[in-house]
Amino acid sequence: MNNAFTLLSTSPPKFSAAAAARVLRDQYGIEGHLKVLDSERDQNFFVEGTAGEAFVLKIANSAEAAGVTDLQSAALLHVEKRDPDLLVPRVMRTLGGRTDITIVGDDGREHVARVLSWLVGTPLELAEPRPDNAAELGSILARLGIALANFEHPCSDHVLLWDLSHAGQLTAWLDYIENESLREICKTHLHRFEEHTEPALNKLRSQVIYNDLHSGNVLVDPNNSEIIAGVIDFGDIVRAPLVIDVGVAAAYLCDSGDDPLSRIVKFLRGYNRVRPLQREELELIYDLIITRNVVTLVIGNWRGAQYPENQDYILSDASLARLRIETLQSLGQRTVTDVFLKACLL
């Protein structure tokens, strides 16, 4: 796990817009206006080309192995072949036909850079009025999983902190959560993960998964927010149990109010229609939803301590993560799981 912690504790690249523009012009023959985009560990630029086209320039963290960056590009190329109608970014090639290049920053660090097509759309989290696309999200994630089902890459087994397979190892970082009651909640669930969830996961089907479906990575049509316009950001793909992909997405669909499971149920039905879930997988989704939110809190508080100047962005989902955990706790594992089984007719 040391390399995974190094990735999140190494400062992101710091290229100026002028330097990034030179890379685009010299390596890709692209000229245009650049704007910095938010990113957790990399540096991304929106590129508005002079001919009206749009791209995103992605400069990877120097701590990320080149093979891991290639994994992301190779996965996108594979999805494009297996399911061309899936709305995901396309990999752009350099003037020399390459899918990525290595560039050096002013501090001497080397970074892998890539250019992807820009998908037009509004992030689902910003859409007004907020649509209920949960069933369609489930269908799209299932299609994405099918497209990646036979994808192989030498770096697909890389260790990623956001991979729930390794959640138990985050107990060493619980002290970064200052709130004592919240720290105890997280400790209890990480212990349950180690004792119950992880052994069960190891017996289930596994493949390369997308691993990061949430409203910030889903685009909707600017003119009709009911229509999903694309899925972006393949930075967290990894080989893991397939049900983790489902659990991660469901973790962001838990609501407060009278029917907190409504969107999760719609999502599961949408997924299950395209790719049926196994009973053993559905039995773990309650724990995976909670675990994902616990991981959000632990990693967020740890990174917030490392980068206090960026704490607001890093901890932007912390209060919601706690609310989701407490909501599911109040319902109970058996009650929630029975609802999920019924939703998928098991």
Image (cartoon, rainbow, N blue to C red):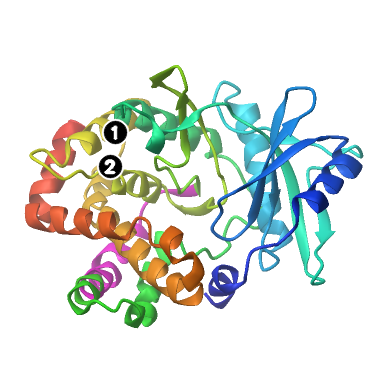
Residue count near mark 1 (Cα–Cα under 10 Å), binned few <14, some 14–19, many ≥20: many
Q: What residue did someone put label 1 on? A: 267
Location of residue 257 by image quarter: top left
Residue 65 image point, x, y percent: 69, 63
In this view, the mark in front (2 or 1):
2
Q: Amino acid at mark 2?
A: Leu
Residue count near mark 2 (Cα–Cα under 10 Å), binned few <14, some 14–19, many ≥20: many
> Secondary structure under badge 1?
helix
Closer to the camera in the image, 107 or 8: 107
Residue 324 image point, x, y percent: 21, 53
Lower position in the chain sequence, tag 2 or tag 1:
2
Where's the C terminus, which quadrant?
Answer: top left
| Numbered range of the magenta stretch | 187-207
- In reply to whether residue 84 is colored magenta, the answer given is no
Closer to the camera in the image, 300 or 207: 300
Q: Residue furthest top?
A: 223
Residue 221 image point, x, y percent: 47, 21
Q: What residue did someone put label 2 on? A: 253
For the question of whether residue 87 can be seen, the reply is yes
